[in-house]
Amino acid sequence: MRPAVEGSMAERFDDGEKEKKKKKRRSNRRSKQNPPSSSASEVNEAQGLSPDSGKIGTPTHASPSLGNSLKQVNVCSSNEQGLSKASNVAFISIPPMHINEQVEPGDLRILPMCGGGIDSNSFSEPTGCRGSSGINKNKDSVPCGQIGLCGQEKYFSPHWSVEAVEKELEEGDVFKALFHVNAHNRLEAYCKIDGMSTDVFIGGIPAQNRAVEGDVVAVKFDPLPLWTKMKGPNGSCNNTATPEGCNLTEDKEVGGNICKGKAKVDAEYESAHGRSYPGQNKEDADQNSLYKSYPFTETTMVYDDITSRGSTNHLDLHGMANHDSINGHHCAAPNSLKINSCSGQSDAVEKMCLLVNSFPSKRPTGRVVAIIERSPRREGIVGHINVKQWVSFRDTSKKDVKKNKNLISEHEYIQLIPTDPKFPNMMLLVRKLPKCIKKRMKSGDVTIEMDLVAVQIDDWVEESPFPEAHILRVFGQGGEVQTQLDAILFQNAICLSEFSPEALSCLPCVPWEIPLKEIQSRIDLRNLCIFTIDPSTATDLDDALSIEKLPNGNYRVGVHIADVSYFVLPDTALDNEAKFRSTSVYMLQRKLPMLPALLSENIGSLSPGVDRLAVSMLLDINVAGDVVDRWIGRTVIQSCCKLSYEHAQDIIDKAFDFEGSNFIEDDYPRVYGHFEWPDVIMSLESLYEISNVLKQKRFTDGALRLENPKVVILFDENGVPYDSRLSERKESNFLVEEYMLLANRIAAEVICRAYPDGALLRRHPEPNMRKLREFMAFCQKHGLELNTSSSGELHWSLEQIREKLKGDPVLYNILISYATRPMQLASYFCSGDLKDSENEWGHYALAVPFYTHFTSPLRRYPDIIVHRTLLATIEAEELYMKHQKALQGSKEVKVQKRCFTGINFDKSAAESTEGREALSAAAVKHSVPCAETLADIATYCNGRKLASRNVKDACDKLYIWFLLKKKEV
């Protein structure tokens, strides 16, 4: 009976009955001659990696109806024709689709692994390890054996129990790690263990043991003799590689078609530019913390017979309280193991690091033994469904259908092919499909394969090589731009909801004026010539500049940042919503703001001609670029002019002649108040002069820049892209950037000294040294000298190469692209998490020991946290000084002016009883988060920031695809 069933799996339904019988006999003979083996290659065949896979094991008691279901599943598995056709019209934006990796026909023709043959002989599992196989099954799910996919054979080892994992973690026999899959080869996965310089290689589907991209797993090392050879030059890695999409000038925001070039701070070179290229190894696995996010709660969708285009993706702001969280922040994904932190891990990691460093030519290998935390990416996977073979099967089984009134069997499955090659193919139970899809399937409409859908993984049992999933949303035809945009936003869990009435009620009504009492409590700077420099289309103006010449020859530069924390009070509905969104998301034709427009574009924006609240830094800078004195505090300002980058560049280039006959007033912004154009021009020229000194000093101190021209998409009046061009940042961009970088550095220095365990900072690790050595070898091979001993030496080496390749800028740009590969992403962190490792706080590309984000509170939530911490420091300073002055009545007390925020930090004052009490009281008043909460905020914001940039990158690719599609060959 078993051979007969196995034979039926290989039948092709488009041939005649005779041909089917011949094939059946041939298949029977083959199955007798080649019985199933238990090697790991069988699962590889199950994944469509071998064209020879044509059999599946089934129980001997399989019924004819199950046999039909088996045949249907087998036939549906062939995606070569259906998917290729769909991919012709569907541009897969993030991540790439299987365009060049067509799966062989029959990738569901599974060979069983008898006796659990995937278990490694190298290990003995601890007692109690045979735990749950994963997520609890939905009550409607059909066990894999019942549908005949793979009988009762097991393809994967059971996951260890919680108790076993905790015990082994404590003893240092297994390690907690972040799981990533190589986008170019799903058989290769890598696990990143905190504290280890080299990632652990997980080779083969069995060793991955049902983990998916972004899971936090328990990994067990293979013995040393089984470790694989390290690719590239020998030597231990100093760091893990950068995730895909890493770019030094991160956050190129867009307003209309113009980059919001506040490449400024965002161009802090933070993510050090890395890009993903074909051929990258894992370590190319991307998005370290992209989905360590809120557990978006909307998992049920109403389909009926319509698609859900334009609806909010899996998100429910009001349901956040129903999830495990700390102050509303995601702690663990549903169905995650609750694993306590283990003291034995740090010692075990140290020992493993010593072992890895002792064998620099080897990469450690291992296997996944449990999933500690399931990635929220499981809840929103985009792909195409493969129904062509299912329809073919239905057409050739009309007799059976007539006998069976139930047109869709209880056990019929179709396959989903994810657009992201890091995810496995998935099985969808036909009876649970949306009505609109079932209707099209019954009518034989195979064009449904061209539609993009989003699914959620429900279950992945040991007995099945594929996870079971259900459809959350149908986007529409994959060849349409809007469909792709919807899928991009959904896949990155971007919030599309309107702001809640509760959040909007936290804002004052308009027209609004600053209360007189508030003005009196602040320093009034409305007499200064203050102006903004932004893209011409920008509406959220969160930074402005001013400059004064002092009698001693120094300059007093003012960096004025919108005081968003005045409006966004802690723990309000508005604060929670801003925290949830975390960042504004910029697409080429659309902006999804972090804060309501009433705040971000009106009362909080530093618009010209109106009084606005700000947090200002007044920095006294000498001709050498040194800050010799500073004052930080809350102010009232009035911007006199809104300059675009183009206007500022004209002034820098001396091309701005406001007195000439060619000057057209309507082409230039209005100057408000008692200031005139000469005041603005003189101020801008002075700011430009000082910014050049600051930039030169920064690179002399060891900063690094890796930057290529960017592609800018041009749109017509209807918002349709019609062309593209290369664009490089101008001097006006760099001018603003220098002052934003300086302000961020100062803010970081102040808050981490006042609150050493509770400051939200931003770090940029050193690059992957192995990949850096590969780049150096590449340069040497082509006669180019490169010094990689520090960020500064690398920068000057590249500058020399630029001069050498002056006549070939294209080659130099290619070289810079290679230079970005070893770079890692910058990330937010709580200083308390690394209090014993201050050497890890630094920013490699900027070559500074402290850095944070302070200058963009209208569009980044971390900046709001930093504002609150900075304001708490200012208030603590005032409380301490007031207390010290009160003591002067009885005895002489020396009080240092600005002891916490000034150039010279008074550590003894901060550590005194009075200082600690003042800092503590101010932290409570301004709701500075505790270290634990701050760490959660940092992790979440890292994920949202990366998601935001992925959306922007994907949109850029989408519109480039659109232009190429229109272009005549």
Image: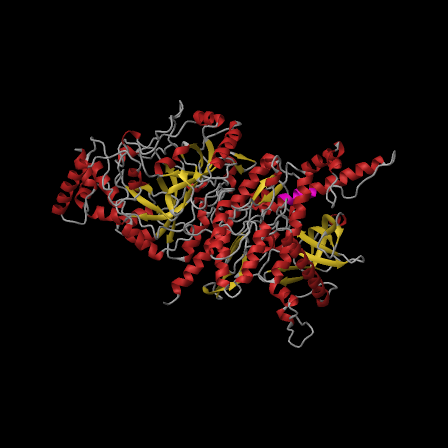
As drawn, 370 above or below 527:
above
Left or right: 402 with respect to 248? left
Left or right: 391 with respect to 924? left
Q: Main secondary structure of the magenta part?
A: helix
Pick out the residue farthest to the right: 890
Q: 336 or 359, which is in the foreground?
A: 359
**Residue sitting at 44 percent across and 57 percent down?**
957
**Residue sitting at 53 percent across and 35 percent down?**
325
Left or right: 303 with respect to 360? left
Is residue 680 in view?
yes
**Residue sitting at 49 percent across and 66 percent down?**
717
In reply to whether residue 637 is colored magenta, the answer given is no
Q: 876 or 341, which is in the foreground?
A: 341
What is the x, y in percent for residue 410? Answer: 27, 38
Which quarter of the picture shows residue 381? Answer: top left
| Figure colour scheme | secondary structure
What is the x, y in percent for residue 421? Answer: 38, 47
Pick out the residue farthest to the top: 127
Q: Which residues are magenta?
A: 865-871
What is the x, y in percent for residue 898? Answer: 76, 44
Pick out the residue farthest to the bottom: 661
In reply to whether residue 866 is colored magenta, the answer given is yes
Is residue 740 in view?
no
